[in-house]
Amino acid sequence: MNRMEPAGEAKLKYGTPDFQVVRSGSFVRCAVTGDPIPLDLLKYWSVERQEAYRDADAVFEREKQVRAAGR
């Protein structure tokens, strides 16, 4: 980690196609797994739910959870 980079969890506003940093930090947490995701590796998020995801598998899992809850 770069010494100039703020440590801790960031707060983001997720948009299309980018996100905006609301509170500085070096990572966000995956909404499905709780794993930390370094901001420079963040590729998956939901604008509608304002959530970050570790990878495509986590996105798929979240979609299944949301659809199951809607039944």
Image: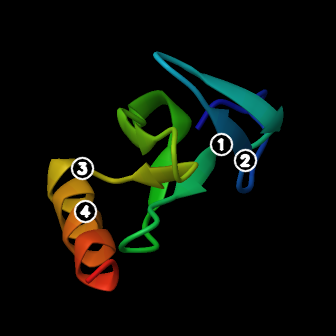
**Among the two numbered marks 3 and 1 on one chain, the one whose residue lies closer to the N terminus:** 1
> Could you tell me how far apart the alpha carbons at marks 3 and 4 are, in whole angstroms?
13 Å
Residue on which the image places disc 2: 10
Between 36 and 45, which is closer to the camera in this rendering?
45
Residue 24 lies, in percent from the top left, at 81, 38
Amino acid tagged 1: Ser
Nearer to the camera, 5 or 55: 55
Quadrant where the image shows the N terminus: top right
Which of the two discs, 2 and 1, sits closer to the camera? 2
Q: In which quarter of the image is residue 25?
A: top right
Judging depth in this view, the residue of 7 and 27 nearest the camera is 27
| Mark 1 lies on residue | 26
CB atoms at circles 4 and 1 under 8 Å apart?
no
Check contact, mark 2 vs mark 1: CB within 8 A.
yes
Find the residue positioned furthest to the top.
17
Looking at the rendered structure, the number of numbered marks drawn on it comes to 4
Query: Whole-percent x and y of residue 2?
Result: 64, 30
Element under disc 4: helix
According to the image, label 4 marks what residue? Answer: 63
Asked which secondary structure carries label 1, the reply is: loop
Element type at mark 3: loop
Using the image, determine if residue 18 lies above or below residue 44: above
The amino acid type of the residue labelled 4 equals Glu
- Tell me how far mark 4 sits from mark 1, CA to CA: 26 Å
Q: Quickly name the residue at label 3.
A: 55
Q: How far is disc 2 from disc 4 in space, using C-alphas?
A: 24 Å
Q: Which of marks 4 and 1 is nearer the N terminus?
A: 1
Measured as percent of width and height from the top left, residue 54 is found at 33, 53
